[in-house]
Image (cartoon, rainbow, N blue to C red):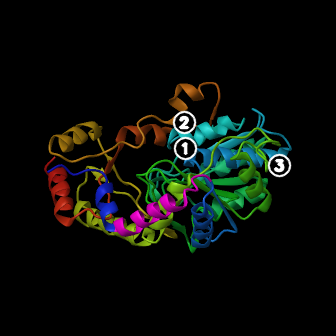
Amino acid sequence: MAIPMLDLKKQYEYMKEDVDAAINRCLDHQRWIFGPEVSELELAVSSYIGTKYCIGVSSGTEALVLSLRALAIKTKGQEYFDRKDKIITTPFTFTATGDAILRAGATPVFIDIDPTTYNIDTNIVREYLDSHSENVVGIVPVHLYGQSCQMDEIMLLADKYNLFVVEDVAQAFGGKWKDRKLGSIGTTGCFSFFPSKNLGGFGDGGMVATDDEEIAELIRMLLRHGGKDKYNVDHIGYNARLDTLQAAIILAKLKYIDEFNEGRRKVAKIYNDTLKDIEEIILPAEISDTYHVYHQYTIWVKNGKRDELQRYLKDRGISTMVYYPVPLHKMKVFNKRCIIYGSLKNSEKAVESVLSLPIDPFLERNSIVKIVTILKDF
């Protein structure tokens, strides 16, 4: 029997009573746009992660765009950043991270990753800022695979150089840096509720968290065409609302998030214990001060054998994924629209070496044993 990366049907069956009840409430009240579940979810997530404000939006991508647009309006008094404005981020992430910077009018500065965590290397960020801080306005750290970036160092640098920090928490809902939930540390935190995320809906959805009242108000305007009154708008806006139905489903699933994250961590521990002696792979590291929520369990395959291993597993019914096969600075969309600092050698090696194994809070031990056995056979 094939083993998928994630069994959403099994998750649904576990929460079926709560989710069905949430959907039925929407069917009863028929308030599909800005229904009561949207504000209920905003308050619940705000309480969960510890911020003053949360704003539901249509996707994780739009959460990033709206955050950056709001910051441009607040900090520069204009609709968009200028192309000379630089925002530091990682090239080893999903396209949306860098694309959001372009859509907000700024230029992404790609800085290499720490190969131990796959997250942006704060030592290189510091090095860049010490010599190239002119026109840098912000940092977008990505908590990749569910692992927190080094947020103390990032916030120290942001304070020193007067930068905003927009956390990309698309893969790390419930993750922590020390005792703080990710998304509550920077100027804003941006979440995705894409179905495969640790907390996912039945379609697209996202959220922005912040303690800044002005930013929160600007985002609320931007997501509904740019004004408090949609027939008389102030800014160049979007139709980026979070649907009531998605909010209801996510709200119903929220009470399970800690249980599911712990389930992922238990699966990761079994992988770690059973794969630790294989010299040809490097296991994901859980660094101190973090609570890793394992959106992905990603190994580093040595000696250029990643693609061969992936085919071997596929032929034996094991699903795997490569997140991500192309670094952002190699994509056409960023050609002549980005700044590359240094060699980015770790990012370029990672795209050739990483492989994500099935990770699911409902992944049964016999399935894990099968995956491990086949991997060891290879």
Left or right: 298 as drawn, with respect to 2: right
Instruction: Tell me the amino acid under the disc marked 2.
Output: Ser
- Which dot, 1 or 2, sits closer to the camera? 1
Q: Is residue 64 magenta?
A: no
Location of residue 150 with respect to 83 vertically, above or below: below
Judging by the rendered image, the residue that carries numbered circle 2 is: 343
Secondary structure, mark 1, is: loop
Location of residue 122 with respect to 256 vertically, above or below: above
Location of residue 306 with respect to 376 vertically, above or below: above
Instruction: Tell me the amino acid under the disc marked 1.
Output: Asp
Left or right: 61 as drawn, with respect to 345: right
Tell me where the magenta segment starts and ends, as one range: 15-33
Q: Position of residue 371 (x, y in %)?
A: 19, 54
Q: Of marks 1 and 2, which one's residue comes earlier in the chain?
A: 1
Left or right: 278 as drawn, with respect to 290: left
Which residue is found at the position 67% from the left and 57% from the top? 188
Marks 3 and 2, how far apart in space? 32 Å
Q: Badge 3: how crowded within 10 Å, few (<14), some, or many (20+)?
A: few
Instruction: Tell me the amino acid under the disc marked 3.
Output: Thr
Marks 1 and 2, how far apart in space? 8 Å
Secondary structure, mark 2, is: loop
Marks 1 and 3, how far apart in space? 27 Å
Q: Is residue 18 magenta?
A: yes
Quarter of image, res 340: top right
Q: Is residue 287 visible?
A: no
Mark 1 and mark 2 residues within 8 Å of each other at the beta carbon: yes
Q: Position of residue 257 (x, y in %)?
A: 44, 68
| Near-viewer residue (129 or 56) | 56
Judging by the rendered image, the residue that carries numbered circle 3 is: 75
Which residue is found at the position 78% from the left and 40% from the top? 135
The disc label shown at residue 112, or none: 1
- Which dot, 1 or 3, sits closer to the camera? 3
